[in-house]
Image: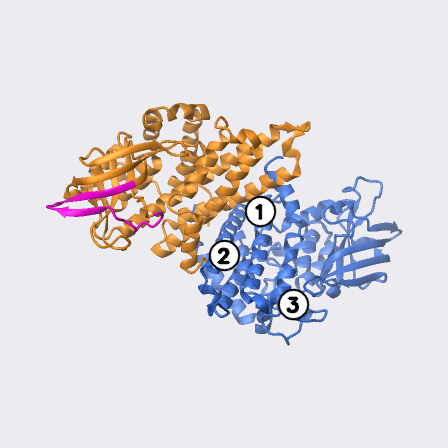
Amino acid sequence: MDLAFTKEEQAFREEVRQFFRDNVPPDTRRKLVEGRHLSKDEMVTWWRILNKKGWGVSHWPKQYGGTGWTSVQHYIFNEELQSYPAPQPLAFGVSMVGPVIYTFGNEEQKKQYLPRIANVDDWWCQGFSEPGSGSDLASLKTKAERKGDRWIINGQKTWTTLAQHADMIFCLCRTDASAKKQMGISFIVFSMKSKGVTVRPIQTIDGGVEVNEVFFDDVEVPYENLIGEENKGWDYAKFLLGNERTGIARVGVSKERLRRIRDLAGKVESGGKPIIQDAAFREKLAACEIELKALELTQLRVVADEGKHGKGKPNPASSVLKIKGSEIQQTTTELLMEVIGPFAAPYDIHGDDGSNEAMDWTAQIAPSYFNNRKVSIYGGSNEIQRNIIAKAVLGL
Amino acid sequence: MDFDLSEEQRLLKESIDGLLTDSYDFEQRKKYMKEKGGWSKAVWDKLAEQGLLGLPFAEADGGFGGGRVETMIVMEALGKALVLEPYLATVVIGGGFLRHAGNDAQKAAHLPGIIDGSKTLAFAQLEKNSRYDLFDVTTTAKKKGDGWVIDGEKFVVLNGENADTLIVTARTKGDRRDKTGIGVFLVPADAKGVSKKGYPTQDGLHAADITFTGVEVGSDAAIGNPEDGLALIERVVDEARVALCAEAVGLMDESLKTTVEYIKTRKQFGVAIGSFQSLQHRASDMFVAAEQARSMSMFATMANDFEDAKERSNAIAAAKVQIGKSLKFVGQQSIQLHGGIGMTMEAKIGHYFKRLTMIENTFGDTEYHQRRVADAGGLI
């Protein structure tokens, strides 16, 4: 047992850090620190910088542009990326549909889609959830009917993150209504510009627009846009959701936020002195930092295990990372609210892309608090994660 | 970075787990409690035979040169089996003082007896009003000729009733809460002027309140610098805290396992109660708490070797906070999920809960350590 990073790993961390210092546009970093939304342009610009460096799809197999890093290197890269902070790669392309395509897609599909995902020539979004299918995803109803060399798609998706920017969607569609619910689902990709696709933004309680409803009305899609085998889509979806095990803890994000809290708490006054001098507040902050340290170690245990025994099946330990990681993220936003106190109130009315430079640094704190309530809901709600632990770990 | 045990460490784990599986089930434990001093000399001898009592000592001193990870393995196993024997008091704490600061003569006088199981030790540190501050010492050690005269009262000294030798913290100069002027002294338990009042503790261990009245010891009684021993005390107590964290992890593992088995078999409304989602979620939360505790126990184990004493203490304090929170949740919910049977002395789960609870209040509770981390500027 040795929890220290090797010299090589430390040098790698320094290399990554230096690259971020030299290449992340300062304004992009500032907006992330302040909890602001980024414009599509700002994100794509950064992702292309990252891709040019060869780090855009770091965890992909080498032949598709991956780096061949060890699990620990991936961990270090993600942590540095989150805590610098710089925008994380677009998960829908890089972590979700990309791996499904290089694992289950045919050669033609790999050639067509993978390089464009890596360079974000296409912005991808995820068509999974439906109004009646949240945690019970397999009950989805969106239908794809085969008609000659085409699919005809009808139905509705919801909670489609950043669909307003998207060029492509990967979609779970029911292709065999007679089969048992998990069995009749296929994984189909198509252009968001197709005729019959309508995107309707959903404004969330923070005032921003991150998610959308997407409607399909007789959308015609070429048959070859099916990934893998017909009616096997549920397997691919499970693969996709289990693929990302450790990033979900978002330790780096919480670290960065805790540093910011400490910084602000040294400036904002309460009772005539900086809040950080208040023992009760300091202890609350320390409590959160301790929880985060424990989570970081738990995450490293999963990473080390992955390094030794390969990725293989989804590890139920990732449910621990999801539950604790989301709770800590939410706690950090609560602490920020506590720091700014009455200045949480002013409302910053922002546009669709969420960018409005007019407000000062306090404006995003309450929205960020509201927005972070989502983290215990998405990606399999924390209640679903508890079901997974009960079943897969405890055998209940 | 590597969280795995080495081959030798795996063998150690197998051997102690094997020993305790054979000789430490819950019924056997009840018998040991009734033996002299409240623990089993026969089990202690077995631990000695397997080399576990000599584990952390250097080979030159007759030990086996085990490190921090080896102690973690042993303490987890002792926790899992709810062991009563005074390993913490004798090997970790008593042995710790000798390892870190004992001179050759002191080591020669005490280590062989610890290693072969013939002698046990106890740490007489807590005072009536000192609570968790290690520097809050009113017991005095006054110079007399070459030696010292010790006066004062110590409380809840684990294994205090049975130990052959007491390790006593006493003030050689200064005032009650001064950080200098504290010494550490070896005092034979049968020395003139030592009077002990023994009693069982809530978790089935044994402790004593000990009064020292004009107890005379020689010049060779002081371990380390008798006028500046706080750093040594902090070092050894930090090791004890780390050991307690590991013990608690073992206790939590067993509590969770026992509880999950129970809810799988206990039937109400015609079904196993473990089929109810509210209980499943509680058990999942217990698992999360236990895993977070395990992570911090590992962190603390490694922190034992940090060069910087402040960084070491801060990391170990943080671990004690996490362990304290986790053990409270796992302990309480183990009782809750067992229902009425969990309230009985007859069921083993309550005994795990009681030991866990006492660990929280040993060498600093959650609040105490949280304040320490906060005052040290946090952990990021």
Residue B375 sits in which quadrant? Answer: bottom left
A254 vs B336, nearest the viewer: B336
Q: In the displayed structure, does residue A285 sit left or right of residue A35?
A: left
> To which residue does mark 3 refer?
A37
* Residue A181: % across, % down: 78, 42
Q: Which of the numbered marks, if any, corresponds to residue A320?
A: 1
**Display colour for chain B:** orange
Tell me the amino acid under the disc marked 1: Val
> To which residue does mark 2 refer?
A284
Q: Which of the numbered marks, if any, corresponds to residue A201?
A: none
Q: Considering only vertical position in the picture, is A221 above or below B205?
A: below
Residue A27 sits in which quadrant? Answer: bottom right
**Display colour for chain A:** blue
Can see residue A3? no
Residue B22 sits in which quadrant? Answer: top left
Chain of the residue under the numbered disc 3 shown in the image: A
